[in-house]
Image (cartoon, grey):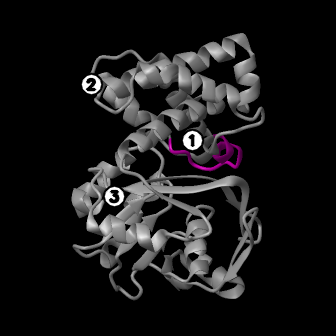
Amino acid sequence: MKILVVGAGAVGGYFGGRLVEKGEDVTFLVRERRKKKLEETGLKISSVHGDIDVRPKLIVSGEKPDTYDVIILSTKAYHLNGVIEDIRPYVDKETMVLPLLNGISHLELLAEHFGKEQVIGGLCFIESTLDENGTVVQTSPIHNLIFGEQSGEETERIMRLTKTFADTKANFIYSGEILKEMWQKYLFISCLSGATTLMRSPIGPIRETKSGFAVLEGIVNEVVTVMETIGAPISKEHIQPQLAKIKEMGYEMKSSMQRDMEKGMQTEADHFFLYLLKKAQAENIKTPFLELIYANLKVYEKAVLGIES
């Protein structure tokens, strides 16, 4: 299968690089600056699962408008509108679009532009970053990419994709319940991101402080209530397991959104929290913790980046 990976950063660079290492037909769609860097140095990955140094195929937007069997999106949510236009020349009626974004609202946006049938579900679990030299540094045992049809069906195309992803030196995992898994990750990430960005702290000090843990409980309860009310595969039964998972996390664990704030970068506040707030408002659900989290993020973006709400 012909694979286009949008972005060669910490996520796309890692999983795409592993597919190149295996010998799959992979092209990276990147910005001009990243293209020049990769042409000079190659795509380098430093990983606990083994290092990689490859020379991948590279294109920039508008170049070589061929079509692909699958397009993997590994960008931030606030870049999605631009990415949609970037990939349009590379999509035909048979192309599968596989987004790895956190959250859920991007599925609706992609379906509006390419049709629901062309958008499959996906998510990933990985700790990786780009260092100052542009090397992808991957540091944890977990390097999972999970994918599947939104309908849960074992279609011919998804089985072809499963075969293509097999035997790669990363875990490409087929799921027959991909939407359920996406919602469960959304629940976890929104709670972790909300608490750590609000308190500017790793999770350890938050959960060991009585009032801090009470805030965590409040966030989890609000997110679960909204998701359950709108018909997501989330229920009150997820509250205690979610809190237990938070208790088990490393003391110094930070959310990626908190790390973005520490770097002075834009956040995915709208994608994560405004989406939930709009759903809550439509259902007349009170969500004071979510409102505080969202206000905190928007004040930060205005003060640091000059981004108006």
What is the CA distance from the residue labelled 1 to the residue labelled 2?
Answer: 26 Å
Q: Amino acid at mark 3?
A: Ile
Q: Quadrant of residue 199?
A: top right
Residue drawn 68% across the image and 57% down it: 128
Q: Magenta span covers which residues?
A: 258-268
Residue drawn 74% across the image and 69% down it: 50
Give the answer, above or below, for where 240 lies relative to 268: above
Disc 1 crowd rating (10 Å Cα; few below 14, some 14-19, many 20+) is many
**In the structure shown, which secondary structural element does the residue marked by tag 2 occupy?**
helix
**Residue 54 is covered by the magenta coloring:** no
Q: Amino acid at mark 2?
A: Ala
Q: Quadrant of residue 96?
A: bottom left
Residue 18 or residue 127, whichever sits in front: 18
What is the CA distance from the residue labelled 2 to the residue labelled 3?
Answer: 27 Å
> Residue 301: which disc?
1
**In the structure shown, which secondary structural element does the residue marked by tag 1 occupy?**
helix
Q: Give the mark toward the camera: 1 or 2.
A: 2
**In the structure shown, which secondary structural element does the residue marked by tag 3 occupy?**
loop
Give the answer, above or below, for where 213 lies relative to 55: above
Residue drawn 49% across the image and 81% down it: 27
| Nearest to N terminus: mark 1 or mark 3 | 3
> Residue 282: which disc?
2
Report x, y in % for residue 157. 30, 69
Give the answer, above or below, for where 41 lies relative to 256: below
Report x, y in % for residue 121. 37, 54
Disc 2 crowd rating (10 Å Cα; few below 14, some 14-19, many 20+) is few
Residue 64 or residue 261, whichever sits in front: 64
Q: Which residue is mark 3?
A: 120
